[in-house]
Amino acid sequence: MSEAQDTNTLKARRFGIDTQHETMAFVRDDCPVCRSEGFSAHSRVRLQNGDHAIIATLYHVSPELLGRDEIGLSESAWARLETKPGAPLAVSHPAPLNSLADVRAKIFGQHLGNDTALEIISDIVEGRYSDIQICAFVTACAALPLDLDETTALTRAMVETGEKIAWPNTPIVDKHCVGGLPGNRTTPIIVAIAAAHGLTMPKTSSRAITSPSGTADTMEVLTRVDLDLSEMRHVVETEGGCFVWGGSMQFSPSDDAMIRIERALDLDSQGTLIASVLSKKIAAGATHLIIDIPVGPTAKVRSPEAAIALQQSFIPIGEQFGIKVQVEMTDGSQPVGRGIGPALEARDVLAVLRGDDGAPNDLRDRACQLAGSLLELVGKAPEKQGTLMARATLDSGDAWHKFKAICQAQGGFETPPSAKHTRPILAARAGHVAAIDNRRLAKAAKLAGAPEDKAAGIDLHVRLGDVVNKGDTLYTLHTESAGELAYAIEYIAANPGIIDLTSP
Amino acid sequence: MSEAQDTNTLKARRFGIDTQHETMAFVRDDCPVCRSEGFSAHSRVRLQNGDHAIIATLYHVSPELLGRDEIGLSESAWARLETKPGAPLAVSHPAPLNSLADVRAKIFGQHLGNDTALEIISDIVEGRYSDIQICAFVTACAALPLDLDETTALTRAMVETGEKIAWPNTPIVDKHCVGGLPGNRTTPIIVAIAAAHGLTMPKTSSRAITSPSGTADTMEVLTRVDLDLSEMRHVVETEGGCFVWGGSMQFSPSDDAMIRIERALDLDSQGTLIASVLSKKIAAGATHLIIDIPVGPTAKVRSPEAAIALQQSFIPIGEQFGIKVQVEMTDGSQPVGRGIGPALEARDVLAVLRGDDGAPNDLRDRACQLAGSLLELVGKAPEKQGTLMARATLDSGDAWHKFKAICQAQGGFETPPSAKHTRPILAARAGHVAAIDNRRLAKAAKLAGAPEDKAAGIDLHVRLGDVVNKGDTLYTLHTESAGELAYAIEYIAANPGIIDLTSP
């Protein structure tokens, strides 16, 4: 195709459309390259600027938007091509995407092997998949759950296609929570305790997938989290721990693309979840890992059986990659702490670390339990002594001191913001709190604007078993805009059972 | 939300981006409505202009493209809203899409019921699903194949959400081919024969899904096919038959959206296939239906068992909707006729209808077999006499006469175009033709530009069992652009086994 390619150039134009991960290109339908190459709307095209090549989805635009010899680029395409206004871009047909046959094979029930997983994940990382193609893969992985070998293959592929970090000494400890429980923000506390004990805990966290906040969203309220690999290494070498957004690490770059689609579908599946978690831990160099699985009727994991199924995958797959995994099943029947949403959760974390009067005990207890398990897992604490040891580190102020030191090393410590609008949601009648629907409470917090609006979310005032009077505040909505406030209220009105009150 | 909605207006601007089915909207990230409502990039937003409301995906654009109080609309959004430049559009949060929970339930193995199918399909028809959401649904239907009840539910939902047509008299005959066989363009011939016999055959056809041409693509070369319902009714009342693109009928509008995604994934599944076929036949008022299933190692249906599985769904589901279905399994081991691609296939169809010397016999035989079955199914022909009767109608010139009359009624008859570039593909050695890979031959025809370029495709010069010498032409590529020619040649070079020659 070389004779054709030489003449197929169009002038780059930054089109200023933010399409996030998906790359898009825009041309007039009378553009000469499209005529000669036969590109039609929605074609996938290969664009090249020197060493940088991408595949983009092509859209046709009307003549007033572009010159005939121009090609408009979405922000993502512009960034990946590292081009300049007016610079020539070579436009050609992309090579056929052979790994799509592997995706179809998985859809039709074939086993996902090491080679096919690597082909699919490599193409996703290289930006060769459209959102639809990624969606077909993640949906197939949910509909036909990955078995142990398939999950291992997917994990390995995700590790091999990303950055890896090696540390001079072991153990390297880590912790992960299989989400689904609003407000369960133990990680920053655990990192502070572990690092105060001299352990190395290079913690990377994700942003929310389907929840109102991820640990990275919460920590971003308090400090800078988008450190690069060398900045992170420096923080960890200095302070022993960090709270960093994993997305800027490129540890498992395919995962971000897949998570974006799963978020749009509100879809989680065991195989992609395990591969997502473990690939990042493997890439981060972890040797010892605690996994917190909250179990409850409206948590992500709804039964002890489902938690055991996860455990039975996490432990052997971790072992294959040299990680000692311990799974802790915790109470998932209600939120942890009071705040739900980045800033409100950050407030609770600070209260526990500072030992404030009125700091949420449940958050404190759970953080100490998990930190204690970690201390025991690496042999820092004698068996059954871990929790006590963790609690002492909190009480002495060592953890709070370490927390501030890590924040300073990451770029400084900030105070959480407050939301513009608040609205109490009142008990319609007297009763005691019989159930709290984590999912719908999380949904209301998202409708209020979390996690995009840092200060938005829900402040929960009751816990299971509490007795309330008619008119008592059950929780308070925090929002940054009147529209979101109205929208969250509308949802709450349509879902009266979010907090289930039974007659006293 | 009424107090918020009243003030949330932005001025419509036609943005000139052709996004096909998916509706997109573009705003500046400092636009006041986004600030007050909390819309972020990739939000789904509801846009309303009087009685017209749509849901669109929101993208942020840089300030030079739009005013702060403007909202840019893709062509699809512009058309659906029927708005004017500068007219106010109400912008709000869409109601939560409850049917997505049904899609997730299907992904996680729950049975698709009548209600859930109707909810999902209604939302797709109303444009409430993004491409990703449609993709998750069609992928789930492929990964966890729909059973008989689920397929019936999907079929019913597709019928209920579309237009229906009733005819004054029965029988209404119809025919469908479960594709996968390049060049298998019997439909126009069968319609001409059936209508020449006085039968009513209001034939609607689809465009290509994953093939180089659909019947609608081929017929579009010869006449106008995008008739609306009343135009089609007039043609059928006048001539007894028609060749119309089904997509302009709105018989099963969800199907077009689903097919578009399946095409992007090159994915077919039995449940969506049966629902797609039967919903359109039910909506078109059919009472008697012949289904042609070509079976061969590289056809869409690869084994008699798979064809029987289709038959076992088609017949009972058809019966539930009052259609007498007969399935014909035909030879799917090689293409039918010589041309592959709209214009080349149209050429073959004309040759058979006119009785030209050298008209492809296989196409003629197959059309007569299927037309004969149809004549028998409705009692027009005695048992085993249908094929002979069909052949006589062809030989007498009655079918050709009827064909031209239908074309004239649809808007006139045109001669097929020829491609700019042709390139013979030669036998690398002597041998006899042991196998023809339908799929890869179709892929080569698509790379050559079919069906978007009407004249593009492949002209096949050999059939199974033929003996060829080194340097003989196996087939000829037809393309409209040098780029596509090069691309198809590259693919053929990388896939030498498309036509398998064994030693003589």
Image: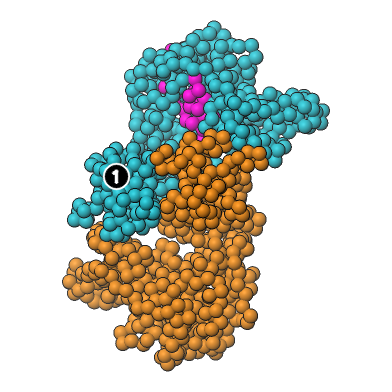
Chain colours: A cyan, B orange
Percent coordinates x, y for residue B160 in the rendering: 62, 63
Outermost residue, right direction?
A504
Percent coordinates x, y for residue B503 in the rendering: 22, 71
Q: Is residue A335 left or right of residue B204?
A: right
Q: Residue at x 20, y 73 (%)?
A: B472
Q: Residue at x 56, y 43 (%)?
A: B9
The stretch in magenta equals A196-222
Which image quadrant for residue B288? bottom right
Q: Quadrant of the N terminus of chain B?
A: top right
Q: Residue at x 35, y 44 (%)?
A: A73
Check disc 1 and report its element: helix, strand or loop.
strand
Outermost residue, top direction?
A396
* Residue type, label 1: Ala
Percent coordinates x, y for residue A91 in the rendering: 28, 50
Percent coordinates x, y for residue B90 in the rendering: 58, 46
As for residue A204 lying within the magenta part, the answer is yes
Q: Which of these two is toward me, B417 or B212?
A: B417
Which residue corresponds to mark 1? A12
Q: Is residue B361 left or right of residue B372?
A: left
Q: Which of these two is toward me, A77 or B503?
A: A77
Whether A371 is drawn above or below A17: the answer is above
Badge 1: chain ID = A
